[in-house]
C-alpha cells in the first residue's frame, strides 16, 4: 500500500458494485458495458472536463469490431481509413485479413471516441463524478476477492473535501501514473524512457506535412488538420528525456523542431503541448483480488500507431463481460444458463489476466521494436533496409499487420442487459479463443463501411485519389480504374457536370466510391477552389483530408499551326496544362501523406514532332520537368512522381468517328490501333499502387509503340 499522508477516509459516502477510476475511453467503455448489463457503476475522474485534444486517433480492426458490436460506429461518423506503418515503414494493415469488413486502419479522434463512449455510459446509468482525485485504494477483504469483499477508495474533491466510496470491485483505468496501481501494490516492472518526443498542436504555422521524416538530427512528423492546426511531433536524436512533472514549454518544442528540421515555428500559437517517451512497463498482474487494471494503468508504452489506445479498449472489453458475470446472471457467452458459483466467478476474473497479460506483453515488445526503428539513428538504417525488404513478403506483412490489428485475439462477448431483454443489434456472443468462428459471426450488419464488389485485388483500398479532368475520356477511365482498386476518387471537371456525374454513377454501379468536384483550371483562384471542394468532399467521407494519389490529367490541346499560335492561346495552354498542375502539386502536398503518388499526364508529343501542336507539346514538356524535379524533391517522403505519355488515344473528339482517320492514326502504333482510355488508365493505376514504389522521375511511354518509329 502507498503511505497514506491524507486524513483517514470518512465512512463510505456512496457505494457501487464497481468503481472505475478514470473516465478516458477505456474507463468509459467498461462503464458503459457494465451499466448496460445492470451493474451499478461509479466513475471517478480527476479532470473536471473531458480532454479537448486528441492524443490518439487510430483505431484498429479488432477495436472496430468492439465498437461495431456495441453499435457505436454510426455515432462515431464515417470511419476514415488510412495507411498503417511499422516503425515508420509503410505497412498496409489490410494484410492481416483483407476480407475483414474493418480491414486496415481507421481514424477516430480520441475526443469523439470519448464523447461517444461517455454518452453511452451515462445513457445506461453509469454515474461519472468529475473533479475527484483518488488518493488511496484499500481492499476490505484482504485482497483475495472473496464474495463478501469490497474495496474502499479515498478521494479528494475539486474543492478539497475528502471523499470515500466503496466498490465491490475497483478498476484502475487511470493511465500511466495510475494511483490505483500504486496504492493497491501492483508491481510494475520494465524500463524507463531513454528517448523523448514532443507533441504539440500549433495554430498559425505553414510547414509541409510529413509522416515519419527521419533526418540527421532526429525524427519529425507534421500533419495539418482542416482547421489549419498542425500536429507536430519531434524527437531530437541523442537527447535524454528530462524528468518532468508538467508539460514542456512550447519554446522547448519549437527549439527541438528547429534543431531537427531547420524550420522556425516559434511564431505559432500552441494549443496543446506534451512530452512522452519510450518507457516500457507492464503490471506483473492485471488483477489483485478485487482490484483490476486496464489500459495504460496496466501497461505503458510509446504511443505509436495508436496501439496504446487499442490495447486499452480491448482490455476493457475483455474485462467487462467477466466483471458483469460477477453480479447475478451467468455470462451470456452461450455456455451456460446456471448461476455461477464462486469458483466459476474466480476463474472468470483470473481469466482476464490470463488472456490480456500475454497480449499486452506481445504488444509492448512490438512497440519497443518500432520505437528503435523510428527513433534510432544511423545505426538502425541497415535494420530498416532489411525490414523493408522483409515487408515486401506477404507472410511478413500479414504477421505484423495481424499483431497490430489484433485480429488473432479473442473477440469478447458484450455483456447483456440483466433482464436478458433481446437486443437485436447485438451480435451473437462467442467464447474467447474461437477467433475464426467469432469473426464470421461478428460481421457487422452496420452500413458504416460500404461493401465493394471484389472484382480486383483492392490494391488501393483505403486510399484517396484526385483525378483532374475525369468527367470524360482518359480521366474518366482512370477514375473508374482507381475506384475499382478500392480508392475513394474525387472526380474533377471544368464545366461538364453531367459527364462528371456519369463517371461517379459508373463507379458506384461498380461498388466503388467517388464524388464530383468542379473547378475551372487556368482561371484565377482555380487551385484554391479545387482544394476547397476536395477537402470538403474527403472530410465528409473519410473524416480526414488526406490525399494519397494525385493524377494531373486535365488538359487542352492546341491543334494550331505554329504561325497561328497567338499569345492568348499560348498563355491559355500553359495556364491549364502546366501552371495548374504545378500549383496543384504544390498545394496537394499539404494533404499528401508520405508514400503518396503523383502522376502527371504528359504526351507522346514531347518525344515525336507534330508542328500543329508545338505550343501544346511545350506545355507537356513543362509537365515532364515538373515530374523530374519534384521526384527528387519528394524522394525523402517516399512520394513518387511520374509522367505518363499517351499516344493518340480515343476521346470524344469527332475525329474518332471517321474510320479512315482512325485507321491512319492507328497505323502509328506498332499494334496498329489507336489507344483506348483503359490502356492509359491501367498504366496510371499501376503507378498508383505500392508495387510501383521504385519508379519515380520517369516518363512512361504509353503510346502503343508510337515512338518506335518506322510505321
Ligand atoms: P478530353 O477528352 O478533352 O477531356 C478533358 C478533361 O479535362 C475533361 O474532364 C475536362 O472537363 C477537363 N478539362 C479541360 N479543360 C479544363 C480546365 N480548363 N479546367 C478543368 N478541367 C478541364 O481529354 P483527354 O483526351 O482524355 O486527355 C486527357 C489528358 O491526356 C490531357 O492532359 C491530354 O493532354 C492528355 N493526352 C491526350 C491524348 C489523346 O490522344 N487523347 C494524347 C496525349 C495526351 P469538362 O468535361 O468539364 O470539360
Image (cartoon, grey):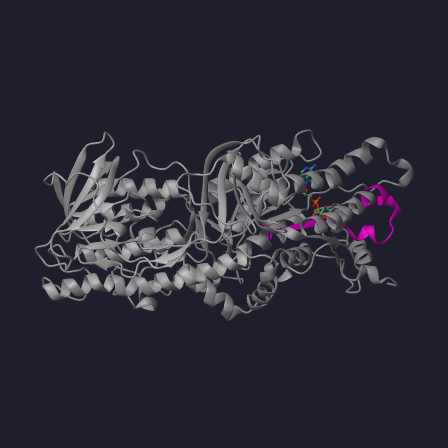
Is 217 left, or right, of 397 in this rendering? right
Residue 435 in picture, x, y percent from top left: 33, 67
Residue 262 on the magenta segment: no
Q: How many marks?
A: 0
Is 431 or 454 nearer to us in this picture? 431
Q: Which residues lie in the magenta part?
A: 594-617
Residue 256 in picture, x, y percent from top left: 56, 42
Q: Residue furthest right?
A: 563
Residue beneath the point at 54% across and 54% down: 375
Residue beneath the point at 58% across and 61% down: 380
Residue beneath the point at 16% across and 48% down: 39
Residue beneath the point at 23% across and 64% down: 351
Tell me which image quadrant ligand 1 sits in. Answer: top right
On the question of residue 100 being in view, the answer is no
Is 679 left, or right, of 538 in this rendering? right
Placement of 486 over or under 75, stated as above or below: below
Is 159 left, or right, of 330 in this rendering? right
Is 1 or 491 nearer to us in this picture? 1
Q: Residue furthest left?
A: 148
On the question of residue 481 being in view, the answer is yes
Residue 461 in picture, x, y percent from top left: 51, 56
Is 366 or 544 nearer to us in this picture? 366
Q: Splitting the image into 4 quarters, where does residue 133 fall?
A: top left
Amino acid at each position: 500500500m502507498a503511505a497514506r499522508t491524507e486524513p483517514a477516509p470518512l465512512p463510505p459516502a456512496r457505494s457501487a458494485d464497481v468503481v472505475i477510476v478514470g473516465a478516458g475511453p477505456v474507463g468509459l467503455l467498461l462503464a458503459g458495458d457494465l451499466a448496460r448489463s445492470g451493474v451499478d457503476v461509479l466513475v471517478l475522474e480527476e479532470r473536471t472536463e473531458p480532454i479537448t485534444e486528441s492524443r490518439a486517433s487510430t483505431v484498429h480492426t479488432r477495436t472496430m469490431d468492439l465498437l461495431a458490436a456495441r453499435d457505436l460506429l454510426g455515432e462515431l461518423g464515417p470511419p476514415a481509413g488510412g495507411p498503417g506503418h511499422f516503425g515508420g515503414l509503410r505497412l498496409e494493415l489490410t494484410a492481416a485479413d483483407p476480407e475483414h469488413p474493418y480491414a486496415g486502419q481507421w481514424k477516430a479522434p480520441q475526443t469523439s471516441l470519448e464523447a461517444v463512449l461517455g454518452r453511452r455510459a451515462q445513457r445506461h446509468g453509469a454515474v461519472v463524478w468529475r473533479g475527484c482525485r483518488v488518493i488511496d485504494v484499500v481492499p476490505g477483504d484482504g485482497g483475495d476477492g472473496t464474495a463478501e469483499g469490497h474495496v474502499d477508495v479515498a478521494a479528494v474533491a475539486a474543492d478539497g473535501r475528502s471523499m470515500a466510496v466503496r466498490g465491490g470491485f475497483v478498476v484502475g483505468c487511470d493511465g500511466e501514473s495510475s494511483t490505483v496501481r500504486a496504492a493497491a501494490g501492483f508491481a510494475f516492472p520494465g524500463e524507463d524512457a531513454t528517448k523523448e518526443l514532443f507533441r504539440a498542436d500549433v495554430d498559425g504555422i505553414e510547414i509541409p506535412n510529413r509522416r515519419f521524416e527521419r533526418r540527421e538530427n532526429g525524427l519529425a512528423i507534421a500533419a495539418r488538420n482542416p482547421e489549419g492546426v498542425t500536429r507536430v511531433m519531434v524527437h531530437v536524436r541523442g537527447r535524454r528525456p528530462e524528468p518532468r512533472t508538467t508539460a514542456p514549454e512550447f519554446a522547448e518544442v519549437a527549439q527541438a523542431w528547429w534543431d531537427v528540421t531547420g524550420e522556425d515555428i516559434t511564431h505559432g500559437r500552441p494549443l496543446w503541448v506534451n512530452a512522452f517517451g519510450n518507457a516500457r512497463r507492464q503490471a506483473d498482474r492485471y488483477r489483485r483480488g478485487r482490484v483490476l487494471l486496464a489500459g495504460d494503468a496496466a501497461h505503458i508504452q510509446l504511443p505509436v500507431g495508436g496501439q496504446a489506445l487499442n490495447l486499452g479498449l480491448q482490455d476493457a472489453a475483455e474485462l467487462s463481460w467477466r466483471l458483469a458475470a460477477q453480479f447475478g446472471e451467468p455470462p451470456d457467452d452461450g455456455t451456460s444458463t446456471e448461476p455461477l458459483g464462486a469458483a466459476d466467478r474466480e476463474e472468470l476474473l483470473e481469466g482476464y489476466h490470463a488472456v490480456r497479460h500475454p497480449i499486452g506483453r506481445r504488444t509492448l515488445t512490438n512497440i519497443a521494436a518500432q520505437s528503435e526503428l523510428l527513433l534510432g539513428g544511423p545505426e538502425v538504417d541497415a535494420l530498416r533496409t532489411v525490414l523493408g525488404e522483409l515487408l515486401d513478403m506477404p507472410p511478413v506483412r500479414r504477421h505484423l499487420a495481424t499483431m497490430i490489428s489484433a485480429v488473432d485475439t479473442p473477440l469478447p462477448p458484450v455483456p447483456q442487459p440483466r433482464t436478458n431483454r433481446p437486443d437485436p443489434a447485438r451480435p451473437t456472443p462467442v467464447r474467447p479463443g474461437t477467433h475464426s468462428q467469432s469473426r464470421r459471426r461478428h460481421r457487422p450488419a452496420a452500413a458504416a463501411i460500404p461493401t465493394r464488389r471484389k472484382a480486383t485485388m483492392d490494391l488501393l483500398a483505403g486510399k484517396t485519389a484526385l483525378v483532374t479532368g475525369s468527367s470524360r475520356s482518359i480521366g474518366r477511365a482512370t477514375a473508374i480504374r482507381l475506384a475499382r482498386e478500392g480508392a475513394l476518387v474525387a472526380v474533377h471537371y471544368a464545366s461538364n457536370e453531367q459527364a462528371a456525374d456519369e463517371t461517379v454513377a459508373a463507379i458506384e454501379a461498380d461498388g466503388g466510391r467517388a464524388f464530383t468536384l468542379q473547378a475551372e483550371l487556368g482561371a484565377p483562384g482555380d487551385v484554391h477552389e479545387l482544394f476547397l471542394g476536395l477537402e470538403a468532399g474527403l472530410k465528409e467521407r473519410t473524416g480526414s483530408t488526406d490525399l494519397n494519389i494525385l493524377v494531373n490529367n486535365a488538359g487542352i490541346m492546341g491543334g494550331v499551326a505554329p504561325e497561328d499560335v497567338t499569345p492568348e492561346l499560348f498563355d491559355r495552354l500553359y495556364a491549364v496544362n502546366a501552371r495548374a498542375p504545378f500549383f496543384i502539386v504544390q498545394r496537394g502536398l499539404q494533404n499528401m501523406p508520405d508514400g503518396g503518388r503523383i502522376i502527371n499526364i504528359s504526351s507522346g508529343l514531347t518525344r515525336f514532332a507534330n508542328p500543329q501542336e508545338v505550343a501544346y507539346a511545350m506545355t507537356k514538356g513543362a509537365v515532364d520537368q515538373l515530374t523530374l524535379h519534384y521526384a527528387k524533391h519528394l524522394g525523402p517522403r517516399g512520394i513518387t512522381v511520374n509522367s505518363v505519355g499517351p499516344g493518340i488515344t480515343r476521346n470524344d473528339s469527332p475525329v474518332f468517328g471517321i474510320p479512315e482517320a482512325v485507321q491512319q492514326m492507328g497505323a502509328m502504333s506498332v499494334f496498329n490501333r489507336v489507344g483506348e482510355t483503359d490502356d492509359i488508365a491501367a498504366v496510371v493505376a499501376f503507378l498508383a499502387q505500392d508495387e510501383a514504389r521504385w519508379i519515380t522521375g520517369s516518363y512512361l511511354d504509353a503510346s502503343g509503340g508510337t515512338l518506335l518509329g518506322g510505321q
